Image: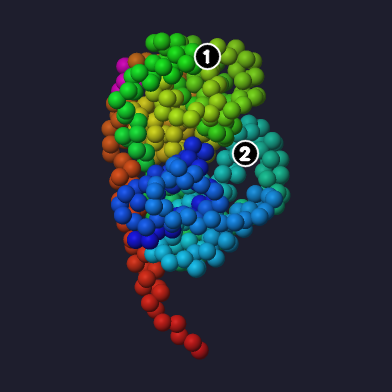
Amino acid sequence: MKIALCHESVLPNRGGCETYVTSLAHRLVADGHEVHLFARRWDAEALPAGMIYHPIEVSAPFRVWRQWGFSRAVAAALRQSDHDVSIGFDKVSGVDILYPQAGVHEMAIEASLRKVRSPLGRGLLRAVRWLDPAEWSFWALERHACRRSNTWVIAISGMVAEHLRTAYGVESSRLHTLPIAALPQRFDPLDRPRRRFEARERWGLVPGRPVGLFAAMNFRLKGLEPLLRALARVKEPLDLLAVGRKCAGAFSHLAHELGIQDRVRFVGFCPDVRDAYFAADFLVHPTFYDPCSNVVLEALACGLPVITTRYNGAAELLRGVGPQRAEGLVVDDPHDSAALATALATMTDVQRRDQFAHAARLAAQRWTFEDHYRSLLAILTARGASRMRQAAVPVVSH
């Protein structure tokens, strides 16, 4: 098939969505498909040979105008393109399939409010956010893209599927649910023990002392503040490795205020995030909102137990109900420092951690990237066939 992938930016290591689009492009090309990329910017060295690039030029000083401009430019370019099916991964109109990796914007706004503890503070912030023209614009663009009757929509998790039904009334006939998946072989190199030793030594991690990994670009949204407060309550030996942002800023100051500066390593951006996974003993991701966290999927593929929250669509992949899951623990509220501290303390028990780790490895085998790819390809094929049937229907003039 001739498949058009549409995303504003495809620069791997900049985020989960861009990493996913890159992996998908490689798999489609390996399968013999003709893959077209419609984007503003990309890393050609990270993408497979044989890709066909369609540069989308958008001149706009502000992000809100740029997103609208990109969406319209892509829609116009697709009308001139010879392809069988098109798929967009963000707020893109005019595609055959919309696969919003960032979830639903309205729910993301509500999630940003959860970061504020005070009800009064949340109310004021809600008013400010909804009075912001940019927020209305993003919401309108997403609403327009999701409500197009001839666009199929794929939800990245059951949580997001429910949000799409509630927020935009997406009908079941157009709605599919398909979690993403990681590539297990990427996290199982032969030199993993050596890389674990070298990474722990490089970051000053104490041998034999358990280490939790926090990996994110948006430290506040992903719950680093309540995580630091919870860590301060844990009496058992435990260190935290924080990866992602170059500048820890206020979070480093908070660690000092809590007296845990010696237990936290802020290592900034990690060129190869696998070193962080190899150095750690479990992942802790107390997010306020995540449609289906890529770091959770990568942790499972790496055989790491997981601590996350009910606001993460990836929690659906952990077997069981309630806080105790086979592959780790799910905390109800990121602000519940006591519950989060209890979860952290649980991970200091080697026997419990090994049980979680064994289940994590099995979870990664139950739902692989290949399983995901085959399911997505079936949806692409079905939508492509539907598109051909629609094109074959003669237009009746009155």
> What amino acid type is highlighted by mark number 1?
Arg
Q: Position of residue 79 (x, y in %)?
A: 50, 68
Which residue has dot 2 on it? Answer: 113
- Main SS, magenta region, reads helix
Say above or below: 260 vs 310: above
Mark carried by residue 241: none
Q: Of all residues shown, which one is farthest toward the bottom? A: 398
How many numbered markers are drawn?
A: 2
Q: Residue at horizontal 64%, vertical 24%?
A: 249
Start-end of magenta stretch? 351-355
Quarter of the image holding residue 236?
A: top left
Pick the front one: 19 or 371: 19
- Give the percent coordinates (x, y) of residue 189: 32, 28
In 3D space, how far apart are the residues under numbered discs 2 and 1 (Cα atoms)? 29 Å
Q: In the rendered image, is residue 79 in sight? A: yes
Q: Residue at x 49, y 19 (%)?
A: 240
Q: Which residue matches tag 1?
A: 263
- Left or right: 370, with 176 as reference point: left
